[in-house]
Each structure stands twice: as structure tokens, then as C-alpha cells.
């Protein structure tokens, strides 16, 4: 019986999607480019034996016959989880952007008490209680992360399994994620930068709480908006997106509406925790509960950087008010 065939879908010629398991989400999409010789894997799934067994099965069942290189679109654990096994001690080259690679190495080397302390400082600053969900997954399982890597730069051209791609590097969902754009094939392998629904989570890391991640994301959306209209987007989760430009518009409008509700709804001086109900519906707030401190900070950073909110400190908590 085949372990892996049922999880594979060919969404474009010689581009197979391997839908790998992920708790709390339907699946993470890993890609096998090329059919036989010189194949390239884009994104690798969660760490752990369940996903590792699926990659073994992909080899055994002939889907993955001759791996030429591995590319990770960004540092999140559901995309880099199996890099160690796939690059086989550095024999298979790994491609990432420099900042995303640095983030995996940093996060995988962080000890549990440091992560807890940074998170608690961050939560208290936002007016949330200490002890809440950590900023990121536990990356220590990935240590030591493979040390041989080739850094890809924005604008670079790269041929992967015979397909020429332009590398687009942008921030927002993570610091410097890679999207792969093929003009000839009318394809965008978007990683998590474009997802269905309301789009990717735009949050901050407790370690880099000042980052204007939403500003970076909206700027990158503008760049994607300048690409041809008729691209098919192959995203890091869920199904292919055929109405690419409309999806960009929906994601952008969602962010702008939340930002407007915050800047217009604020009354007096409020902490991020007190502003949650301005930004998110009750249902969304309940669903995203653990992520709210990180999402709220991305919103307030954006507004403060543009003079639409004023920030000050009261006993270590950041409070926001209308400027002027
Ligand atoms: Zn991600």
C-alpha cells in the first residue's frame, strides 16, 4: 500500500505538491519540482517522525529519485522541519535567504528559560498576562541546523529542475521570505506570503518586537500586485489560488480595515490588550487567542510608525492614544 501517493497532487506540470501533516492546520504544502533527474524540494514540513516517514516513502515509491537541492521559503518550523534529513549532511545544497537562515539558527539555539523570559517581558509590555503562549514554536529539536547554505538574494534568477524563477524576497509574515516567480510558466510559489482566506498572519517575534512587519508586508503586496494578472499561486498551505490579484486586494483591505478600526476606535489611553476587540471580532479573537499579543503589536507598530497612534509607557506597559 502506498503511504504517500494519496497525499500528492500535481498542480502544475512537473510540480508536485506533497500535503504534509500539520497540527492545527489542514496541511503544509511541500513541493517536488522535476520528475526524475535533478529534482528540487521547496519547503519540507514539520519536524518529527511522521513527516520524516513520508519523505522516506516519497523516495521509496519513486517520487523523489534524484534530489539536487532543497529550498526553504522561510524560517517557520512547518517549512524547515525536515531540512536536516533532506540535505543529508550537506551533500544536497540548501537555499534560503540570509535573514531567514539566521532566524532558524538563532531560534534553534535558544534555551527554554530565555524564551519564557523574553515572551513574558513582551506580554507584560502589551498589557497581557505573563505565562501566555510563546512567541514561536520550540525550534531546539532542529539544532544543530545544517551549516551549509547558499543565500538567495532579491531579484536573483535561479533555475530549479529546469524551470527559471525570479527570486522575490519580502518581509511581513517572516523577516525575508522567498517567493519564486516563473514568468514563462505563469506561476508563483508563494510560501506563506499569499494564502487563501484573510492571508498569512502578520505578527512580530518577542525578540524583535519593534519590527514594522505589517509595513513590510503591505509594501511586498504592492510588489506582487505589479506581477502579471494571470499567475497561478501555489501557496504554502491549502489550495492553489487562481484569482491572485483579487486575493491581494482582499488581504490588503482586511489589514487596512483593522488599522482604521484601531486608530478611530481608541478612547483615551489603552494597552494593546484593551484594544483587541477594536481590531478583531469575538470569534476571531477566540480562535487566535494565543497569537493576539503578537498580531496586535504588528498593528500598533504600523500605526505608531506613521503617526496615527501615539505610544507612551506606564509602569512598563505600552499605552496608546490618539496623537495631538
Ligand atoms: Zn509561515
Image (cartoon, rainbow, N blue to C red):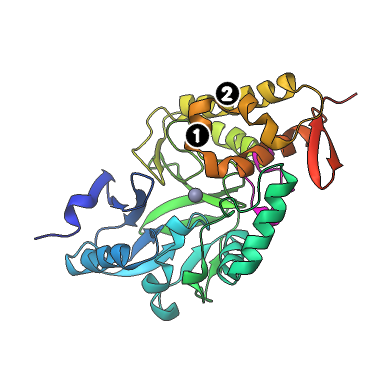
The region drawn magenta spans 203-215
Camera-side residue: 286 or 227? 286
Among the two numbered marks 1 and 2 on one chain, the one whose residue lies closer to the N terminus: 2
Q: How many marks?
A: 2
Task: Reply yes or no: does residue 18 show up in magenta.
Answer: no
Q: Is residue 217 left or right of residue 71?
A: right
Q: At which x and y percent is residue 50?
A: 29, 63
The residue depicted at 50 percent of the width and 34 percent of the height is: 286
The residue depicted at 64 percent of the width and 52 percent of the height is: 205
**C-alpha gap between disc 1 and disc 2:** 22 Å
Q: Which residue is at the far right?
A: 324
Q: At which x and y percent is residue 44?
A: 39, 60
The quarter holding residue 233 reads top left
Q: Are marks 1 and 2 in contact (CB under 8 Å)?
A: no
Q: At which x and y percent is residue 118?
A: 68, 59
Camera-side residue: 159 or 53? 53
Is residue 154 shown above or below 65? above
10 Å neighbourhood of mark 1: few (<14), some, or many (≥20)? few
Which label was assigned to residue 112? none
The answer, for residue 12, to whether it is visible in the render is no
Which label was assigned to residue 253? 2
Q: Is residue 271 left or right of residue 187?
A: right
The answer, for residue 8, to whether it is visible in the render is yes
Q: Is residue 115 left or right of residue 200?
A: right
Q: Nearer the viewer, mark 1 or mark 2?
A: 1
Element type at mark 2: helix
Mark 2 CB near ligand 1 (8 Å cut): no
Amino acid at each position: 500500500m502506498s503511504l504517500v501517493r494519496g497525499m500528492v497532487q500535481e498542480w502544475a506540470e512537473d510540480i508536485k505538491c506533497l500535503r504534509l501533516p500539520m497540527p492545527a492546520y489542514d496541511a503544509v504544502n511541500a513541493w517536488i519540482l522535476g520528475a526524475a533527474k535533478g529534482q528540487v524540494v521547496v519547503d519540507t514540513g514539520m519536524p518529527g517522525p511522521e513527516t520524516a516517514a513520508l519523505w522516506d516513502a516519497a523516495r521509496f515509491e519513486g517520487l523523489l529519485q534524484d534530489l539536487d537541492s532543497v529550498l526553504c521559503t522561510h524560517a517557520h518550523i512547518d517549512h524547515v522541519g525536515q531540512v536536516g534529513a533532506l540535505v543529508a549532511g550537506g551533500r544536497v545544497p540548501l537555499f534560503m535567504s540570509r535573514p531567514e537562515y539566521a532566524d532558524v539558527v538563532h531560534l534553534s539555539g535558544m534555551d527554554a528559560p530565555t524564551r519564557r523570559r523574553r515572551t513574558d517581558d513582551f506580554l507584560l509590555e502589551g498589557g497581557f498576562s505573563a505565562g501566555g503562549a510563546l512567541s514561536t514554536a520550540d525550534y531546539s529539536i532542529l539544532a544543530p541546523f545544517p551549516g551549509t547554505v547558499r543565500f538567495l538574494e532579491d531579484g536573483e534568477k535561479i533555475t530549479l529542475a529546469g524551470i527559471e524563477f525570479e527570486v522575490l524576497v519580502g518581509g511581513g509574515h517572516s523577516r525575508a521570505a522567498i517567493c519564486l516567480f516563473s514568468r514563462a510558466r505563469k506561476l508563483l510559489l508563494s510560501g506563506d506570503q499569499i494564502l487563501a482566506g484573510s492571508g498569512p498572519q502578520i505578527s512580530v517575534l518577542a525578540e524583535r518586537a519593534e519590527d514594522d512587519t505589517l509595513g513590510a508586508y503591505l509594501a511586498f503586496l504592492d510588489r506582487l500586485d505589479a506581477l502579471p494578472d494571470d499567475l497561478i499561486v501555489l501557496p504554502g498551505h491549502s489550495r492553489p489560488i487562481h484569482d491572485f490579484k483579487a486575493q491581494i486586494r482582499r488581504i490588503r483591505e482586511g489589514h487596512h480595515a483593522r488599522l482604521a478600526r484601531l486608530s478611530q476606535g481608541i478612547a483615551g489611553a489603552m494597552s494593546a490588550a484593551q484594544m483587541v476587540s477594536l481590531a478583531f471580532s469575538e470569534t476571531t479573537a477566540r480562535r487566535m487567542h494565543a497569537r493576539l499579543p503578537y498580531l496586535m503589536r504588528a498593528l500598533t507598530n504600523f500605526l505608531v510608525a506613521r503617526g496615527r497612534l501615539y505610544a507612551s509607557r506606564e509602569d512598563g506597559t505600552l499605552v496608546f492614544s490618539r496623537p495631538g
